Image (spheres, rainbow, N blue to C red):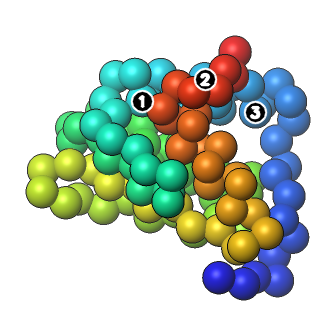
């Protein structure tokens, strides 16, 4: 995946901590599985979907170089995250945030 969009997140340190905390909380409440290749599966539900879609929309604004997709699959919500090669570490960080492996707040 290549892009002409700059590889940079526009969040401040405070905003980033808040975002990571949102991801971690959602993961604690609804995470089924997460893989290092950028696929994260959640329990389906209206509130979970709304929260996940809000996070995805916010990430798309601050990190427009990411390709984020939420879809339904077999009764689950599946978030697929892709990035240009030079930003693949960002996908791993997002997976870690949802998985609770990094602290945000």
- Between discs 1 and 3, the one toward the N terminus: 3
Query: Residue beneath label 1, please?
Result: 27
Q: Give 71 or 34, whichever is nearer the viewer.
A: 34
Q: Element under label 3? A: helix
Q: In x, y percent, where is residue 53?
A: 44, 48
Q: Are marks 1 and 3 in contact (CB under 8 Å)?
A: no
- Between discs 3 and 2, the one toward the N terminus: 3
As drawn, the label of residue 21 is 2
21 is higher (above) or lower (below) than 53: above
Q: Element under label 1? A: helix
The residue under the point 54% across, 44% down is: 95
The residue under the point 86% across, 30% down is: 13
Disc 3 crowd rating (10 Å Cα; few below 14, some 14-19, many 20+) is some
Q: Is residue 49 visible?
A: no
Q: Element under label 2? A: helix
The residue under the point 48% across, 32% down is: 99
Q: Is residue 75 visible?
A: yes
As drawn, the label of residue 19 is none
Query: Residue beneath label 3, please?
Result: 16
**Quarter containing the N terminus:** bottom right
Q: In x, y percent, where is residue 39?
A: 42, 56
Q: Are marks 2 and 1 in contact (CB under 8 Å)?
A: no
Disc 1 crowd rating (10 Å Cα; few below 14, some 14-19, many 20+) is many
């Amino acid at each position: 995946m290549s892009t002409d969009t700059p590889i940079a997140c526009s969040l401040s340190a405070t905003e980033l901590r808040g975002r990571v905390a949102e991801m971690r909380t959602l993961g604690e409440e609804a995470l089924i599985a997460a893989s290092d290749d950028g696929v994260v599966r959640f329990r389906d539900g209206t509130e979970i979907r709304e929260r996940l879609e809000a996070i995805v929309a916010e990430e798309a604004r601050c990190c427009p170089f990411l390709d984020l997709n939420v879809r339904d699959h077999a009764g689950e919500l599946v978030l697929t995250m892709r990035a240009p090669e030079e930003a693949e570490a960002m996908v791993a960080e997002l997976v870690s945030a949802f998985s609770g492996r990094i602290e945000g707040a």
